[in-house]
Structure formats: C-alpha cells, structure tokens
Amino acid sequence: MKTNMALAVTALVLLSACGGSNMSMVPTTPPSTPKPGVPSQPGTPSQPGGTPSQPGTPSQPGTPSQPGTPSQPGTPSQPTQPARPAPTMNVLQGRLDAAAASRTAVSRLAPTRVASVPTSGSATFSGPAIMTVSRGTAAYQMIGDSRLGVNFGSRQMDGKITNIQGRRGNGKTFSAAGQIDYDTGNFPSGRSVFGVDYSGVLTVGTDRIAIDGRAIGGFFGNPDGGGTSAVQAIDGTPGTDAARSIGVSNMTTRLNGEAASGQIRIIGQN
C-alpha cells in the first residue's frame, strides 16, 4: 500500500528597518529658528538572497516486491532396490535350479478345495518369481524372491519381488536395480483361484525394463484338511506359452520404451 505524503514548507523572510536623525552644529550667531532637518530615508533593506529553492518532490516509495512463490517440495521418489554385484554363473544357476524344484513340488500338489480356503487370518507365501523378457536379439532371463501376502478375511493380497538377478542372451550375468510390486490382488468368495496385479521397472546397465500385468493363479495343497499350503500364478504377453495356458494375456512388457515379449511365473509356499 502506498502512502502519499504532503510536504508544506513556509519561507519566513525577516525584514530589518534602520532609522535615525541628522543634527546640524550650533552657530555662534543667534540662531534662527531652526528647522528640523529632513531625516534621511532609511535605506531599503536588502532582500534576502535569491528565491529559496523549492524542496524537491519526495520520491514515492517503491512498490515493495511481492514475495516469490515458494517452490513446491518435489515428490519424494519411491524407494527402489539398488543393483547388487552381478552373481557368478554358478550362483545364478543355483537359484534357477532351486526355482525349478519349487515349481515341481507345487505342481504335484492338488488344488485347494473351495471349502478349505480360509475365511479369516492371513498367510505369506514365499518363493521364486521367474521372468523372461525379449525383443529382437536382446533377451533376459531373470529370477527374484517373491513374497505374496494374503489376507483371507478381506480377500486381498500384496507383496513384492526383490533381489532380481539373471543373465542376458549372451550369457553375461547381472543384478537388476528395482523391484516388482504386487499392487492389488483379490479372489472371489467361493473360489480357490485369484488374480494379482504386478508392476515395476528394472534397470540393467543402460537398459530399462518395464513390466505390468495381472497374474492368474490358484491355491494348492491340503485338499482334505483346512487351509492351503502353496500358490502359483502366471501371466504372459500375447503369443507366449504362459498366455496360452491361462487363455488370456494381461502382461505388458517394454524394453527401453519399445514393446517386448515377456512371461512371469510366481511360486510361493508357507
């Protein structure tokens, strides 16, 4: 807000008047009747120096600058798993062999009967997640550690796949930065099958692998008793064995922004 100020300046001029009489000498002869001398006119007092300069118009106060709009805090980046050192071929092959054994063990289990699927409580199913991604001559075979949490009361699922390692088509091993998250999972009442959404971005060297989809699976084990002991779910891009086996394709895979072929198999036991 601006303030207008009026400045009144009064110039006071003091005039000094000087007055006096001029007496003639007394003559030796009888004086004639003296006539008073004409008094000299007082000098016109000098005028004060030049017209005083008018005070300068005071400068108006500058418009105060508006405070800058504070920068909005950046959206915090989501935590991601950094890349670990690449495994040796023997270490990687050991993980792949263990995953194959888990797959065989779960495949031998009978599907859990609907009546045996719990309606309360929760369980965590841990095991391997096996993934493949390819485009042209670029190919990646990967394995990660899956943890799928199931709340039987709300019939919801969540979890993630971490510690993802693999090998390229040229045989070189790698550890990927990033993880795959189970975003949403659910299974309808009166069924022993489920669907679980997954998504994530992995970085392998200068390559960026984006994976997204919905795996279809089921509960296995304990056919005659209460509860379930294992899960298995798969998904794939159109034309893959995984997509054909479940009769639908929910998976989208991109390698450096370009569409790629991919498959995923999730295995877990509790």
Image (cartoon, rainbow, N blue to C red):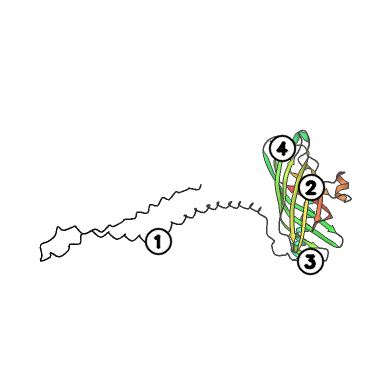
Q: Which residue is mark 4?
A: 155
Mark 2 or mark 4: whose residue is earlier in sequence: 4
Q: Where residue 164 sits in the image (x, y, percent)?
A: 73, 57
Q: Which residue is mark 3?
A: 172
Q: In the rendered view, would you say 32 is above or below 108?
A: below
Q: Where residue 232 sits in the image (x, y, percent)?
A: 78, 46
**How far apart are labels 3 and 1 at the CA level?**
99 Å
Residue closest to the eye, 75 or 170: 75
Question: Label 2's element?
Answer: strand
Question: Label 3's element?
Answer: loop
**How far apart are labels 3 and 4 at the CA level?**
41 Å
The answer to whether residue 155 is visible is: yes
Tell me the kind of residue under disc 3.
Lys
Residue closest to the eye, 86 or 209: 209
Tell me the kind of residue under disc 2.
Gly
Mark 3 or mark 1: whose residue is earlier in sequence: 1
**How far apart are labels 2 and 4 at the CA level?**
19 Å
**In this rendering, would 143 be left or right of 54?**
right
The image quarter containing residue 22 is: bottom left
Q: Where residue 240 sits in the image (x, y, percent)?
A: 87, 51
Counting other residues with Cα less than 10 Å from the Cα at mark 3, is it few (<14), some (14-19), or many (20 or more)? few
**How far apart are labels 4 and 1 at the CA level?**
100 Å
Front disc: 2 or 4:
2
Front disc: 3 or 2:
2
Tell me the kind of residue under disc 1.
Gly
Mark 4 or mark 1: whose residue is earlier in sequence: 1
| Mark drawn on residue 235 | none
| Mark drawn on residue 213 | 2
Q: Which residue is mark 1?
A: 50
- Asked if disc 2 and disc 4 are in contact, CB closer than 8 Å, the reply is no
